[in-house]
Image: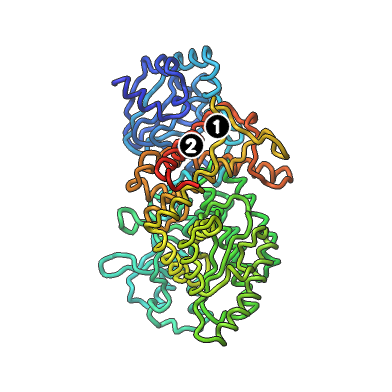
């Protein structure tokens, strides 16, 4: 091995990336490299402790337990992941089986050198302890499969859970024949194939109940009359949480699993329930089953429990945000549909839109309502009057319903219940022209706020038409972009001249850091600016980074650091807010920097420095336009 290459690799791997040059150089002397073919057992549960710490250089491994005679997947390890520390010094025996899932190369670090390092270097000892000693005794017991259910979603591939014994049939059979096959195969779903063997549709037990029995259909009719041809698919290599998101978003209970674009298996919500023990899907089904807003109140109270599971099981901030956004969307849509049922259908089509953090799918715990209504242009004055009257009553009822289920009203009244924010499309287009032609501070704020919008119910084309008009007036609008650049630098990261934290000087939050205003908001504002420059319509911050990393020079240079900064600060914020709620206190964004570990302090300072560096670049780019 070339040791320089080893050092270069470990400089990207925690906790080694934080070691001093001296400590890292001393530790890698005598490092070995070992090859494990696919399927090889690297460590066996209950076996003897090893003399090496393993770092995966290439390939991957799975950790699993034997539970009730079946293999239960606990975790996956990929490039840069480390294992073997707990058993390294005889303090523990391996509590899982570790098996190579691909041809895998590991770096092996000798016990003696690591022991010498942690005995002589206090900082190294702290880094290793924080990284490897957080595993509790509970996760070494069989109950692990239940206490860490959500973590399994983020580490288990769909292909490891999906059923392979598929029931399939040609597309030209009758409903009766399809029912017979399902009965004989003891299956709740039947997939139909075309002449080329490609899946084209599915029938489930619920289809048979709702479309055939309840409707009194002729069972001799072609099964194509009741099958769902809009197949929702997932790849066998995707993680299970991706499957959960698809099921929640589309309100379905089955996913067809493909491998290399070929039919491979079927995944059901029951499979996922068994895998994780408890599920966000259960909350969604509970939401959908309610017939009143009052019935939603206890359901909404369970969402905090999802945070608890995801946090305790080590989920990334972005994954937590995505799942919570899907649940919150369901909750809001249910309030809207219940209100529609109460008032009757609207006189014209409309879109219920959300913006701000909700528009970017970056809500943490339920934040203020930020919403609006865009409705279709009325045909005449009579229809216009009917629309004004309907949406006035409708928006007030939805506002009150959302208040009941935990979404506070917006203090600035940026809500559909405010007449300004419920207008026909032609008025919204006039807003876009006015805001962008005369970019006063308020107009710029309105522009960037509505730029972070998405439709969660109704006719999405109405929002698309508004956004197109808004974007057309932003492109090449140097004055407006300069004002947006000013917004992106208004919150400087709280790092002083000597890299000390700059905290609140007085008031209720004296000596504290504001993670939202000083950490998250600058990243959000910067990425929105870059998205405006390129004329893209993507709203989530991390998706914006992904879309811009090949086309925007600043994002291209700092993409990895921006992702890391956003993930770290957002996770710290979620953890802090959940801890406040757990103690019965209202969540906020203020933390005491002295309560952070040395590693957290170092990481957040690095994130702040990256933000400051990018803000400096923006100032240089828009030097003549900054307020």
Instruction: Identify the residue at horizontal 43%, vertical 43% (top origin).
Output: 623
Q: Nearer the viewer, residue 418 or 76?
A: 418
Q: Nearer the viewer, residue 209 or 579?
A: 579
Find the residue positioned furthest to the front.
Answer: 624
Q: Which residue is mark 1?
A: 495
Give the number of marks: 2
Q: Residues within 10 Å of mark 2 (few under 14, many from 20)?
A: some
- Estimate the x, y position of residue 597 in percent, counting from the top left: 59, 28
Q: Which residue is mark 2?
A: 612
Q: Nearer the viewer, residue 381 or 214?
A: 381
Instruction: Identify the residue at horizontal 32%, vertical 68% (top origin).
Output: 193
197 horizontally vs 361: left or right? left
Q: Quadrant location of the N terminus?
A: top left
- Estimate the x, y position of residue 421 in percent, counting from the top left: 58, 68
What colour scheme was applied to this rendering of the protein? rainbow
C-beta proximity under 8 Å, tags 2 and 1: yes
- Estimate the x, y position of residue 462 in percent, counting from the top left: 47, 71
Tell which circle, 2 or 1, labels the residue nearer the N-terminal end: 1
539 horizontally vs 552: left or right? right
Instruction: Identify the residue at horizontal 48%, vertical 79% (top origin).
Output: 212
65 horizontally vs 555: left or right? right
Residue 270 visible in the current orientation:
no
Q: Secondary structure at mark 1?
A: loop
Q: Give the CA distance from mark 2 to mark 1.
A: 9 Å
Residue 624 occupies which quadrant of the picture? top left
Residue 520 visible in the current orientation:
yes
Q: Secondary structure at mark 2?
A: helix
- Estimate the x, y position of residue 243 in percent, counting from the top left: 46, 55
Residue 111 occupies which quadrant of the picture? top left
């Amino acid at each position: 091995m070339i040791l320089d290459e080893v050092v270069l690799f470990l400089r990207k791997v925690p906790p080694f990336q934080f070691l001093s040059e001296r400590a890292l150089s001393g530790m890698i002397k005598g490092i070995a490299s070992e090859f494990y073919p696919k399927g090889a057992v690297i460590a066996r549960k209950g076996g003897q402790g090893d003399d090496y710490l393993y770092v995966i250089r290439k390939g991957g491994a799975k950790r699993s337990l034997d539970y009730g005679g079946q293999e239960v997947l606990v975790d996956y390890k990929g490039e840069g992941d480390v294992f073997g520390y707990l058993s390294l010094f005889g303090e523990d025996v391996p509590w899982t089986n570790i098996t190579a899932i691909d041809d895998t190369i590991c770096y092996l670090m000798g016990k003696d050198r690591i022991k010498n390092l942690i005995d002589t270097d206090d900082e190294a000892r702290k880094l290793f302890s924080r990284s490897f000693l957080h595993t509790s005794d509970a996760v070494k017991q069989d109950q692990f499969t239940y206490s860490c259910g959500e973590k399994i979603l983020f580490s288990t591939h769909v292909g490891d859970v999906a059923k392979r014994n598929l029931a399939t049939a040609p597309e030209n059979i009758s409903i009766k024949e399809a029912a017979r096959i399902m009965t004989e195969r003891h299956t709740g779903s039947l997939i139909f194939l075309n002449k080329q063997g490609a899946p084209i549709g599915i029938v489930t037990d619920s289809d048979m109940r709702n479309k055939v029995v309840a409707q009194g259909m002729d069972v001799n009719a072609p099964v194509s009359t009741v099958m769902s041809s809009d197949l929702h698919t997932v790849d066998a290599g995707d993680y299970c949480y991706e499957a959960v998101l698809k099921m929640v978003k589309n309100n379905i209970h089955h996913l067809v699993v493909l491998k290399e674009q070929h039919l491979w298996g079927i995944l059901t919500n029951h499979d996922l329930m068994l895998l994780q023990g408890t599920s966000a899907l259960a909350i969604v089904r509970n939401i959908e089953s309610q017939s009143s807003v009052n019935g939603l109140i206890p359901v909404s109270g369970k969402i905090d429990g999802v945070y608890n599971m995801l946090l305790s099981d080590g989920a990334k901030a972005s994954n937590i945000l995505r799942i919570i956004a899907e649940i919150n969307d369901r909750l809001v849509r249910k309030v809207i549909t219940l209100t529609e049922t109460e008032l009757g259908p609207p006189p014209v089509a409309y879109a219920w839109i959300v913006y701000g953090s909700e528009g970017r799918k970056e809500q943490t715990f339920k934040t203020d309502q930020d919403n609006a209504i865009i409705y279709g242009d009325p045909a005449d004055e009579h229809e216009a009057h009917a629309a004004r009257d309907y949406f006035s009553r409708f928006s007030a009822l939805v506002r009150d319903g959302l208040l009941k289920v935990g979404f506070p009203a917006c203090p600035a009244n940026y809500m559909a219940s405010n007449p300004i924010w419920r207008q026909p499309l032609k008025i919204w287009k006039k807003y876009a022209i006015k805001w962008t032609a005369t970019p006063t501070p308020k107009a710029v704020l309105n522009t960037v706020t509505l730029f972070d919008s998405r439709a969660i119910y109704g006719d999405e084309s109405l929002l698309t038409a508004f956004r197109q008009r808004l974007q057309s007036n932003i492109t090449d609008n140097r004055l407006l972009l300069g004002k947006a650049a000013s917004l992106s630098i208004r919150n400087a990261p709280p790092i002083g001249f000597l890299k000390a934290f700059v905290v609140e000087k007085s008031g209720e939050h004296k000596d504290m850091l504001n993670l939202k205003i000083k950490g998250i908001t600058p990243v959000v504002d910067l990425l929105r600016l870059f998205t405006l420059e390129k004329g893209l319509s993507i709203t989530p911050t991390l998706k914006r980074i992904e879309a811009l990393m090949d086309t925007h020079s600043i994002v291209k240079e700092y993409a990895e650091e921006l992702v890391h900064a956003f993930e770290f600060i957002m996770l710290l914020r979620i953890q802090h807010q959940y801890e406040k709620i757990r103690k019965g206190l209202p969540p906020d964004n203020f933390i005491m920097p002295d309560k952070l570990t040395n590693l957290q302090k170092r990481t957040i300072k690095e994130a702040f420095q990256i933000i400051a560096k990018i803000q400096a670049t923006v100032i240089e780019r828009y030097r003549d336009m900054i307020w």
